[in-house]
Image: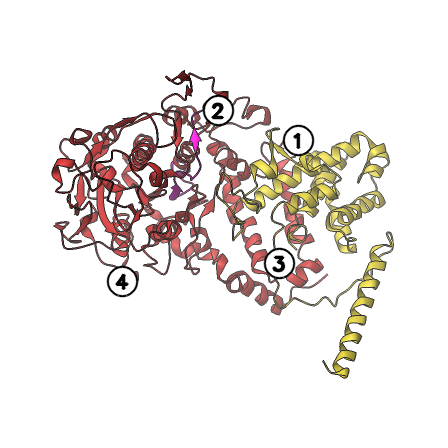
Chain colours: A yellow, B red
């Protein structure tokens, strides 16, 4: 490599480091509204991968502060990933099923299985937070205090922080706060139940975005 | 938030259809294929995993018929039964062991052949590979005869457009379930893998049967929020939105998911009645209305993976979920409930032999460790046990489908074919006069097709009793032709044509001898 080429490379690398450091600073400043970045560059290859081999379930467990075996059990007996939906969710089972590689293409039932797992995990987290607010992970303020715009907005941002590891954009917060009205409509009026169900459905919606499923 | 520009719209559409490249196919071609879905035929591929040998079942040879009876795979005369009114033979055996496995068994082929003779057809062929995976794949692609499409994909493409899951693969460790090579087929034609027939139906509804109920209407609204408002504007979507995998995921969330959940398939396909092992009622679920009947037909459904596959296969066809299902014995040992190969822990009906060892009860073994391929260790016993297994499952499916009306006085069986697809044949020689022996892989063999749509009660081709090798037939007349071997594309074409598939596009031979 020539000296000029080395200099260019160092400049580029330094610039990249500076950029990363800058983003890290934003991510660590909870409550500071991130700058809207409209200069996102579309990927030329758009190469993403589903969170196979249980990554999706592990990420979900981590985000909701659940033990892996608390995420979801079908019929109360069968671990959703290890026993019930392992192959559908991109796992392998070479010993009894002879499946040594994840399925090359996600099966039609995969999005349904994902919804099922996420709904169960979200409902568990929400019920625990609302039942024992002192130990709450995500929804303590909502469980303890009034359901107002600020509380909903804080809970919604918490979902993005914990499930997608980033702050929500203002538009995303607006959508989730507005969604509370839909929960009230479905549950037949404003109530603690409506807020609780809003929390479950919002958690589900964020957890099952493709951003939460692919990397 | 990004706006939907014309450029972005074009990019999105391109991504959804073309970039997916191919591995994901193009689902919206469903409408084009829908014309063929009006008069469906059904295909069951039943793999004879490991190498089911035709001269150990319907074309068995008596020792006295052969000039080399001691040297090739022939049976004592009395063990080969003629089935009256048919060209078929059957071998009913009883053995104290399966080679080194100390479990006795009885096998019965004659009962199945007698009951179903009018719908049975044997067609001989000579294969192109004795590699298991290659042989399995070529058994369903005719050695890539039609752009590498599998028979299941061809049938699903022709008849499956209106079905929620047209092509379901229950045999997970067999290359008959591999995806074909033609990526231009609509994606609904490709197989849906079902690893566990008992629990898989729970993945047919995102809401029903959850431990903590959530209002379906609210979930639907949350899905709309996610799909239409949260995702489109996210930075992730703006960067990776053109991804083929994301396009595929978006498509699956649409019409296919609506068809599956809207059809309440979860309650139609749950195999097992409510029990402590499957506490369905506690979770607001109900088993299939056929669950009890299936337990009668496939009594080992709880312990035998093949029985469970067959039970779900029936439900998939009967409920018009699928037009083709693929099943087969696994390469793993299966024992009847209560039996174990750990002799010390046997408690269920075992007896003591002359040496004081405990004997596992006869009939406790359901599947050999490597299916038909256990013939390497014990050819005669393995072939007998495994053919009995294949015929028992096929017979159960035939009985169930005959009892199920399709419409206009027709039964489902009138429109169904079971294709018994072997990996390849087995070697024909044995040590002089050996009653038990090990066999290798051989290209020469035959297939069995079961259906009212095939040329029933016929053996197309024949077998040379002096060599154990099968020979071919005239594809037009079906006349035996000792100087001919049938190749894979010809048999592949004949089976598809019997299912009403026009194979002219692929330039395959016309084989009227194989259809009724």
Is any atom of residue B155 visible in this view? no
Q: Which residue is disc 3 drawn over?
A: A48
Disc number lying in front (2 or 1):
2
Q: Which mark is residue B212?
A: 1
For mark 2, name the chain: B
Please name the residue that numbered disc 4 is placed on.
B507
Q: Residue at x 76, y 32 (%)?
A: A128
In primary-sequence order, the first of circles 1 and 4 is: 1
Q: Secondary structure at mark 3?
A: loop
Magenta segment, which residues?
A: B317-338
- Nearer-N-terminus badge (2/4): 2
To which residue does mark 2 refer? B273
C-alpha distance separating marks 3 and 4: 39 Å
Q: Are marks 2 and 3 in contact (CB under 8 Å)?
A: no
State whether the magenta stretch is mostly helix, strand or loop.
loop
Residue A87 or A165: which is nearer the viewer? A87
CB under 8 Å between callouts 1 and 4?
A: no
Label 1 to label 4: alpha-carbon separation = 56 Å
Q: From what the image shows, is residue B142 above or below residue A182?
A: below
């Amino acid at each position: 490599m020539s000296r000029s080429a080395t200099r260019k490379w160092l400049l580029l690398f330094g610039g990249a480091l500076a950029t990363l450091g800058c983003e890290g600073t934003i991510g660590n400043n909870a409550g500071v509204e991130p700058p809207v970045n409209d200069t996102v560059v579309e990927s030329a290859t758009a190469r993403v991968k589903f969170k196979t081999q249980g990554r999706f379930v592990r990420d979900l467990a981590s985000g909701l502060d659940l033990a892996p075996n608390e995420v979801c059990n079908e019929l109360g007996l069968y671990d959703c990933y290890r026993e019930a939906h392992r192959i559908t969710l991109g796992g392998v089972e070479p010993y009894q099923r002879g499946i040594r590689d994840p399925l090359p293409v996600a099966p039609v039932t995969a999005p349904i299985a994902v919804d099922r797992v996420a709904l169960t995990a979200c409902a568990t987290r929400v019920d625990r937070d609302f039942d024992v607010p002192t130990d709450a992970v995500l929804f303590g303020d909502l469980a303890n205090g009034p359901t107002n715009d600020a509380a909903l907005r804080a809970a919604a941002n918490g979902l993005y922080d914990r499930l997608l590891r980033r702050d929500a954009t203002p538009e995303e917060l607006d959508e989730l706060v507005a969604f509370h009205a839909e929960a009230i409509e479905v549950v037949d009026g404003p109530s603690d139940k409506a807020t609780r169900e809003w929390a479950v459905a919002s958690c589900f919606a964020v957890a099952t975005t493709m951003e939460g499923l692919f990397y | 938030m990004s706006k939907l520009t014309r450029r972005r719209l074009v990019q999105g559409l391109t991504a959804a259809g073309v970039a997916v490249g191919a591995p994901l196919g193009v689902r919206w071609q469903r409408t084009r294929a829908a014309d063929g879905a009006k008069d469906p035929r059904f295909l069951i591929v039943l793999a004879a995993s490991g190498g089911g040998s035709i001269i150990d079942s319907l074309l068995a040879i008596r020792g006295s018929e052969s000039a080399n009876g001691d040297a090739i795979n022939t049976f004592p005369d009395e063990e080969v039964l003629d089935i009256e009114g048919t060209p078929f033979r059957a071998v009913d055996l009883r053995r104290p062991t399966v080679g080194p496995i100390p479990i006795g068994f009885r096998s019965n082929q004659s009962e199945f052949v007698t009951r179903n003779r009018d719908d049975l057809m044997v067609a001989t062929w000579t294969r192109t590979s004795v590699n298991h995976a290659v042989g399995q794949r070529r058994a369903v692609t005719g050695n890539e005869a039609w752009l590498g499409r599998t028979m299941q994909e061809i049938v699903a493409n022709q008849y499956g457009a209106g079905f929620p899951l047209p092509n379901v693969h229950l045999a997970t460790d067999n290359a008959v379930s591999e995806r074909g090579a033609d990526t231009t087929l609509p994606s609904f034609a490709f197989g849906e893998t079902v690893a566990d027939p008992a629990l898989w139906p729970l993945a047919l509804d995102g809401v029903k049967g959850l431990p903590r109920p959530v209002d379906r209407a609210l979930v639907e609204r949350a899905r709309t929020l996610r799909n239409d408002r949260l995702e489109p504007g996210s930075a992730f979507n703006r960067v990776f939105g053109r991804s083929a995998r994301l396009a595929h995921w978006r498509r699956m969330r649409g019409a296919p998911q609506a068809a599956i959940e809207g059809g309440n398939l979860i309650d139609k396909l749950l195999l097992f009645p409510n029990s402590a092992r499957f506490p369905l009622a506690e979770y607001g679920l109900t088993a299939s209305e056929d669950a009890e009947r299936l337990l009668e037909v496939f009594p080992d459904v709880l312990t035998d993976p093949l029985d469970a596959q067959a039970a779900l296969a029936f439900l998939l066809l009967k409920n018009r979920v699928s037009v083709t299902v693929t099943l087969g014995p696994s390469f793993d040992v299966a024992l009847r409930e209560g039996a174990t190969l750990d002799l010390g822990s046997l408690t269920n009906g075992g007896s003591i032999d002359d040496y004081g060892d405990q004997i596992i009860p006869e009939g406790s073994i359901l599947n050999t460790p490597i299916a038909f391929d256990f013939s390497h260790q014990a050819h005669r016993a393995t072939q007998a046990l495994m053919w009995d297994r294949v015929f028992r499952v096929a017979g159960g499916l035939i009985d169930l489908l005959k009892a199920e009306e399709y419409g206009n006085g027709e039964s489902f069986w009138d429109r169904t074919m079971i294709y018994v697809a072997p990996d390849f044949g087995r070697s024909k020689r044995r040590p002089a006069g050996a009653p038990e022996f090990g066999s290798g892989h051989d290209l020469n063999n035959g297939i069995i097709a079961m259906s009212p749509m095939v040329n029933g009660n016929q053996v197309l081709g024949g077998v040379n009793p002096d060599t154990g090798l099968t020979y071919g037939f005239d594809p037009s007349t079906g006349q035996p032709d000792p100087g001919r071997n049938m190749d894979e594309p010809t048999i592949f074409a004949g089976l598809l044509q019997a299912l009403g598939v026009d194979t002219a596009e692929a330039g395959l031979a016309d084989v009227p001898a194989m259809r009724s």
